[in-house]
Image (spheres, helix red, strand yellow):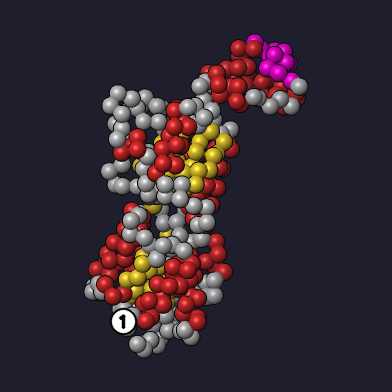
Amino acid sequence: MANIKDIARVAGVSVATVSRALSTPSLVRPATIERIEAAIADLNYEPNHLAAGLRRQRSDNVIVAVPSIYNPFTSAFVEGIENVARANKMRVLLGITEGDVDALNKFTSMIAGKQADGLILLEKNLPDIVLNPPAKSKLPPMVAACEYPPDLNLPRVRTDNHEASALVVGHLAELGHQRIAAIAGPLDQFMSKDRLSGYKLGLLRARIEFDEALVAQGDFSLQSGYDAMVRLLDGGADFTAVACANDEMALGALSALQQRGISVPDEMSVAGFDDLRFGAFAIPPLTTVHIPTVEIGEAAMRLMLDSLLQQDREGPAREVVLPHRLIVRQSTAAPRKRRRK
């Protein structure tokens, strides 16, 4: 098996130059880099990243903390992280917390123990080290995504859930709907709160009075969307459209409407949120807000790489806000029949 000395010999450079090219290529002339790359290709050399990591006091591992793996949003987010990590020869370790703060604390301990270099959070909870930071030492590299308090001073990435939700309601109001219900997510999550407040903002902009009876809460799952729609239908309030806080709950709502014999969109318009892949194949195809979930993961990993390179950086942490857009499909239309109570 070829080693670094063989590469140096074939490229006609010193071992130190090859080592520098592998670890810090910006310090090596482009022409020299080309010769070294050619030698690597000829010799089919694969560097020992673990050994290199030990020399640099780096593991080249990044932990991604998620509450569960069952939400398609999570898998798309992790896909984005993996895209950037793989391109930068980093490994992604998936940590499922199920809402357990102790799990987050164990992940930060892994960073302290050099088993991982940083932690990316897609999680409503925060590790103890963030809530009670040590007085004389810096926080380990961490990035928050989507679900975090507005005053959190960590590198972070999100979309504008508030405006995106208002956009959905505005679309329904422009179609002529005046009684617009909402199926909200769990209100102990910042993202859910933003989407519900955006729903209220959309009503306000359309000059539609907010009615608490038209809001049902779910937990982002298919079953909770089904159950929430049943509660709305049985609640006695009249409505012709419903804005759901994610696509899974919207699909559950569609199922409940189908079982009740309520036609979509003739008798009821339904809109989702996130633009997950299966929404386009629902019956009817689901109107939704496109959230660039894979790109959010990619941005989170780039922020992590920046943090690893600039661990002495002080001051306000960087925030990346990615754009959203409305995707109009066949599940929403102008009200044609008013649903009876």
Q: Residue at x 54, y 67 (%)?
A: 280
Q: Residue at x 43, y 34 (%)?
A: 108
Q: Residue at x 47, y 68 (%)?
A: 223
Q: Main secondary structure of the magenta part?
A: helix
Q: Residue 229 is drawn in which quadrant? A: bottom left
| Residue 167 visible from this viewpoint | no
What percent of the width, then of the height, locates residue 183? Answer: 37, 69
Amino acid at dot 1: Ala
Is disc 1 placed on a helix, strand or loop? loop
Q: Does residue 310 appear to the left or right of 7 in the view shown?
A: left
What percent of the width, then of the height, locates residue 87? Answer: 58, 36
Q: Quarter of the image for the C terminus: give it.
A: bottom left
Camera-side residue: 240 or 50?
A: 50
Query: Considering only vertical position in the picture, is 112 above or below 285?
Result: above
Query: Considering only vertical position in the picture, is 112 above or below 97?
Result: above
Find out whether residue 87 is within the magenta segment. no
What percent of the width, then of the height, locates residue 25? Answer: 56, 22
The segment highlighted magenta reads 2-14
Dot 1 crowding, Cα within 10 Å, few <14, some 14–19, many 20+: some
Q: How many marks?
A: 1
Q: Quarter of the image for the N terminus: give it.
A: top right
| Residue 224 visible from this viewpoint | yes
Camera-side residue: 24 or 126?
A: 126
Q: Residue at x 30, y 23 (%)?
A: 136
Q: Does residue 10 appear to the left or right of 55 in the view shown?
A: right
Q: Does residue 158 appear to the left or right of 70 in the view shown?
A: left
Camera-side residue: 73 or 305?
A: 73
Q: Which residue is mark 1?
A: 237
